[in-house]
């Protein structure tokens, strides 16, 4: 089900619609996004391109289980 929802979000975005996705599944969100923001206790602590965040050591350790 998660993969199907991801495909639907991706398809909608590819048609030109901007999407604000608030998601706890960081890996899924960063794979779908162009930009990302990491919140901790309501404060933005990291932001940038989704690709850069996906490969960030800090994000990997804290949110991706690596």
Image (tube, rainbow, N blue to C red):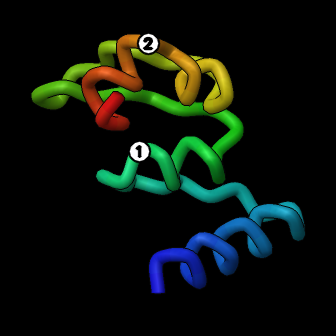
Question: For this rendering, which residue is in front, 62 or 47?
Answer: 62
Comparing marks 2 and 1, which lies closer to the viewer?
2
Q: Quadrant of residue 33?
A: top right
Q: CA distance from mark 2 to mark 1?
A: 13 Å
Indicate the position of residue 15 as horizontal and vertical percent values.
88, 69
- SS at mark 1? helix
Q: Residue at x 56, y 76 (%)?
A: 3
Question: For this rendering, which residue is in front, 42 or 7?
Answer: 7
Question: For this rendering, which residue is in front, 38 or 43?
Answer: 38
Reading the chain from its start, which is encountered first: label 2 or label 1? 1
Indicate the position of residue 8 as horizontal and vertical percent values.
67, 79
Quadrant where the image shows the C terminus:
top left
Relative placement, left or right, of 30 versus 39 is: right
Indicate the position of residue 41 as horizontal and vertical percent values.
11, 28
Q: Quadrant of residue 11?
A: bottom right
Q: Is residue 11 above or below residue 25?
A: below
Disc 2: which residue:
57
Other residues around mark 1 within 10 Å, as few (<14) / some (14–19) / many (≥20): some
Residue 16 image label: none
Relative placement, left or right, of 27 versus 49 is: left
Indicate the position of residue 48 as horizontal and vertical percent values.
59, 18
Q: Residue at x 22, y 21 (%)?
A: 43
How many marks are shown on the rendered structure? 2
Disc 1: which residue:
26
Other residues around mark 2 within 10 Å, as few (<14) / some (14–19) / many (≥20): few
Q: Is residue 16 above or below residue 8?
A: above
Q: Residue at x 70, y 56 (%)?
A: 18
Q: Residue at x 39, y 22 (%)?
A: 59
- SS at mark 2? helix
Relative placement, left or right, of 50 versus 42 is: right
């Amino acid at each position: 089900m998660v993969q199907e929802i991801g495909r639907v979000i991706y398809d909608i975005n590819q048609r030109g619609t901007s999407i604000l996705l608030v998601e706890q599944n960081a890996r899924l969100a960063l794979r779908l996004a162009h930009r990302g923001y990491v919140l901790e206790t309501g404060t933005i602590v990291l932001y940038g391109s989704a690709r850069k965040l996906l490969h960030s050591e800090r994000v990997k350790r804290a949110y991706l289980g690596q």
